[in-house]
Image (cartoon, rainbow, N blue to C red):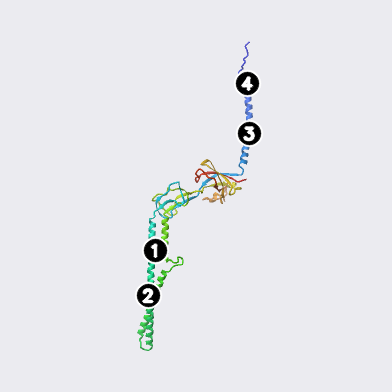
Amino acid sequence: MAEADPFPAKDTPALQAAAAHVQRTRARRSRLALMVAGPIIVIGIALWYWFGHQGEVETDNAYLKQDMVSVAGELTGLVTSVNVRENQHVNAGDVLFTIDPSNFKVAIDQADAQIANAQSRIIALQADVGANAADLAGARDDVALAEANFARAKALLDRGFNTRANMDQAQHAVASARDRMFSIEAEVEKARAQLAQGAQVPGVNPAVAAARASRAKATLDLHRTVVRAPAAGIVTQVSRLQVGQMVFPGVPMATVMRDGGTRVDANFKETDLNHMRAGQKADIRLDAYPGLKLTGHVDSIGAGTGSEFSVLPAQNATGNWVKVIQRVPVRIAIDSKSDRPLIAGLSATVTVHVGK
């Protein structure tokens, strides 16, 4: 009789059935555990988020903003020099570019000539007044003489020793003398009127004051040919500044991004504003710098939604109206300092701690 095999085969049907049963049991237990643990984990995460983030409102519809000053020439002229380059930092008063001053120097010379002409005219008028005053005295003497002759001729006529023709000549002489006197008086008054001083500029002849005003305007225009930075900041958009470029008043030639004017304009849903107040703490994260976290506070809440200030406001008085949650701009002031450059227009995520 053959001896029994001490090591029976492992793949017998009985062993295979037992192994399959064990695997099914383990699978059922795993599914049961997952079914029980899954909802618990989800509920736990939801509770953690709810209680851990209670009193916070967040939006990723936010962007860095910075105060910008457009620099334009106040005169018409050609650019003669450019003293800045793109993205250069400047201080208030630094020269950005200059405009050809030739025309304005000529204007100053013309104003000086007008002043000299007005002054010489005053001297001439004063001389005319003096000369006319002497002529006026002589004309008055002539009137007195003509009147005396007329009186004597009339006395002789009354006594029958004079003719009517002599009386007419004496009367004509009186009228001529008076007309000449009146003419000289008018010339004197005219000269004195031209020498008069108005109450607006006491002590100065109007012609001289007008010429001086023209010179002051020309001097101011010459000063404006040197265009300076209105504030400290970064100069950008200077590609339009080229030597020989024509400058026109009011046309921007460069832009200065003012130092210290960086902020965040966050557009929150109207449903997030119930507990939001100015002064509440805010956390700021920038998409450009994932590891950077800035702190700030709510500076102000906008007076109108974004749609109110759009070029084409929404017209909701229609039959197919659909309600859309509006966005309200909220200005966030940045309190902490950043070791990375804060570039205007960067996307940000803002979380405001509303305390509720």
First reached walking from the N terminus: tag 1 or tag 3: 3
Q: Which mark is residue 37?
A: 3
User: In the image, which is nearer the foreground, mark 1 or mark 3?
Assistant: 1
First reached walking from the N terminus: tag 4 or tag 2: 4
In the displayed structure, 59 sits above or below 25; it is: below
Q: Which mark is residue 134?
A: 2
Residue 1's spot in the image, x, y percent? 63, 10
Residue 164's spot in the image, x, y percent? 36, 85
First reached walking from the N terminus: tag 3 or tag 2: 3
Going by the numbered disc 4, the residue's amino acid type is: Leu
Going by the numbered disc 1, the residue's amino acid type is: Ile
- CB contact under 8 Å: marks 1 and 4: no
Q: Say which residue label 4 marks.
A: 15
User: Horizontally, is 102 left or right of 51 in the view?
Assistant: left
User: Horizontally, is 84 left or right of 2 in the view?
Assistant: left
User: In the image, which is nearer the foreground, mark 1 or mark 4?
Assistant: 1
